[in-house]
Image: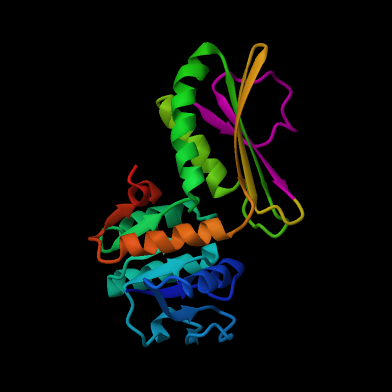
Amino acid sequence: MTKIIMHGCNGYMGRVITDMAKSDPDIEIVAGVDVSGNESCGYPVYTSLFDVKEDADVIVDFSIAKAVDGLLDYCEKKEIPVVLCTTGLSEAQLSRVSEAAGKTAVLKSANMSLGINILLKLIKDAARVLAPSGFDMEIVEKHHNRKLDAPSGTALALADSLNEAMDGRYHYVYDRSTRSQKRDPEEIGISAVRGGSIVGEHDVIFAGTDEVIELRHTAFSRAIFAKGALEAAKFLAGKPAGRYDMSDVIGG
């Protein structure tokens, strides 16, 4: 039985994970943390991690960027593993994640779904063949109108995967509205759409002369992220200090 503290339990993803955990015999959420205080989650909810009285094997975090600093402080002090799902972290916070991984197990992934993590591998293989043949690479991501960060962490992870395949030679372009020049062959364009209730859609476009290849991942429910987070929690519990990601969970 893996015992979990749900950090950000009153948020949308926190509630989805709470509901899904109820049907998993290998998971027990023993406490939650949220600035809005207690709600009827079926477990104690605190406004601060440092107030939590229950023992746990791992923390699952779906909160907001400004809450991550305190989370990492707690995880370092208690040496408790953390599945860090919050996106939109600053460069300083990302460095802080690496520091924390020196003291406890940290699983950080831009996207918790199995499909996205397979896509990260597929596009790397495609880039190695297509980019040297003159194909331009673009990413278009779409999310609901409540999402705070843009582009999404997943879109950036996809861009990083493409760039890694090309030995880091490419740079990212997020906005062409102030430019009057042709496209640089070694740029990756990243566009963000925000609207309605779109759960998440990511298109990776390889555009060549007279042909276009598109690879798309569409999330129809946030349950895929909750399932991934719970599987990651089971994997991470008891692991030694270090950085992990979803490729470790899926055995890639």
Q: Is residue 99 visible?
A: yes
Front one among 182 and 108:
108
Q: Which residues are magenta?
A: 168-194
Front one among 156 and 2:
2
* Residue for point 63% across, 50% down: 200
Q: Quadrant of the C terminus?
A: top left
Choose top left, top right, bottom left or bottom right for residue 58. Answer: bottom left
Q: Quadrant of the N terminus?
A: bottom left
Residue 83 pos. (x, y %): 40, 62
Q: Is residue 251 magenta?
A: no
Q: Coloring scheme of the render?
A: rainbow
Residue 29 pos. (x, y %): 43, 77
Residue 191 pos. (x, y %): 66, 38
Residue 69 pos. (x, y %): 44, 66
Choose top left, top right, bottom left or bottom right for residue 57. Answer: bottom left
* Residue for point 65% across, 54% down: 199
* Residue for point 46% across, 35% down: 161
Horizontally, residue 173 falls left or right of residue 8, namely right
